Image (cartoon, rainbow, N blue to C red):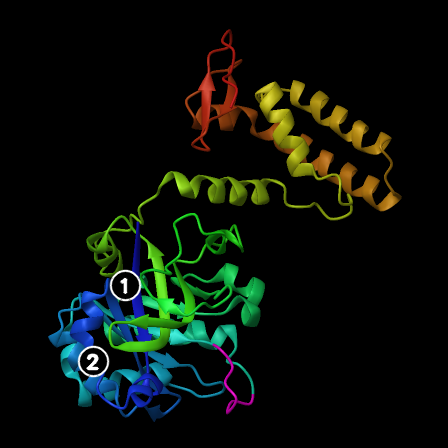
Amino acid sequence: MTVIWLDCSNHDRNRIAKPLPMPAIRADHCSAVIVKWSEGTWRDPFAVESLNAARAAGFPIIGVYHVVWPGQANQARFVHDSLARELPWLLSFPGRVVMADCEPFQEMPHAPSFAECVAFLNDCGPLFGLPVSARWAYMPWWVYGEQIRALQFPWIQSDYGTNPVGGAWALHPADTDPRYGKHAPTIPNGLQYGSQLSWDGLPMADGNAARFTDEAAFVRWVTGGDTDMGLTNADIPIIRQAVGLELNEPYPGLGADANIKRSLREWVRVNNYRINHDVMDAIASMRKAILDAGADDATKAQLDAAVGAIEQTVKAGDAALLAAIGGAPGASVAYTMTGKLEAVPPDATPPTT
């Protein structure tokens, strides 16, 4: 199931030369509206009109977005104080959202930095009294790339595909749309999927989508009441890809076809990771196999250092680890699908996963 919403600005208002038809847009499957409030210290002249219309139309989620300007201080304070003067009801509206629009515009010297965008959203927390789920970051991957993996706020990604012209609801992405998993293991919370979409009475506008079981679940998530984003079978391949990428992270110096994480994972699966001194035999065998396959001196030194560190950890930590998870001397330990270590009786066979 997907929910969709509109983000709009003075450009949309100017294009149709009249107030945006918020009741018709609301009736056109639209669950939220996010209106441009400001850019640096510039105020959108039609924001108050559009936000009041959205409130009258009964939108459960209403928000503002601010174009973060590079090198400018106290931008969150500017947004808050101007709202307090011009539109005070929004500061107490239950479904309010503040979104940082982080992208380069022609009038900017350069795009705002990742740190500037994060600082803006951090500042919005105490100023607006908003949970993290109501402080969004619109950040195109083509601008910020790998930095986005460190983002601790809901990420709205833009990927228009072929950017077709048509109805926002008719063209919304399916739950299985590959754009959601394009940058796994980082998955966007929302996807801006087009800029030439039609809402009832508003042509050629943006459309955004997110995967929730229904509008009520979307509202609960935004307001901090429920973080369930409606996990479905369609998410399983994305989760599998994310886990696979994490486990198979390349280890420096071993080349493209070998990595310690993958080797250890396979060894864990086969041998069930028994915490006793047999572990060193298995690690030594793994080391030998990697060296026999061909390794330079730097890699050999790296492996020797890793094996030495593991040996010391095993010798010093066997008893403490078993005691911490409720095991007894002679017991073994196995990983489970939950990622926990669980004690296994000495004469039992650890489960395979």
In the rendered structure, the answer to whether residue 230 lies left or right of residue 88 reads right
Which element carries disc 1, helix, strand or loop? loop
Tell me where the magenta segment starts and ends, as one range: 103-109
User: For residue 28, what is the image quadrant?
Assistant: bottom left
In the rendered structure, the answer to whether residue 161 lies left or right of residue 38 reads right
104 inside magenta stretch: yes
Single out the mark in the foreground, 1 or 2. 2
The residue carrying pointer 1 sits among few (fewer than 14), some (14 to 19) or many (20 or more) residues within 10 Å by Cα, namely: some
- Expressed as whole percent of the image width and height from the top left, the position of residue 287 reads 77, 30
Q: Residue under circle 1?
A: 131
User: For residue 11, what is the image quadrant?
Assistant: bottom left
User: For residue 254, what is the image quadrant?
Assistant: top right
Disc 1 versus disc 2: distance between alpha carbons?
A: 21 Å
Residue 91 visible, this angle: no
Q: Is residue 146 above or below residue 318?
A: below
Q: Is residue 335 above or below residue 139?
A: above
Task: Name the chief secondary structure element in magenta.
Answer: loop
- Expressed as whole percent of the image width and height from the top left, the position of residue 277 reads 65, 20
- Which residue is at a point 27% across and 63% down the rendered structure image? 131
Question: Mark on residue 111?
Answer: none
Mark 1 or mark 2: name the one nearer the start of the chain.
2
Amino acid type of the residue that numbered disc 2 sits on in the rendered structure: Leu
- Which residue is at a point 43% across and 47% down the rendered structure image? 176
Q: Residue under circle 2?
A: 51
Which element carries disc 2, helix, strand or loop? helix
- Which residue is at a point 52% across and 51% down the rendered structure image? 184
- Expressed as whole percent of the image width and height from the top left, the position of residue 230 reads 31, 46
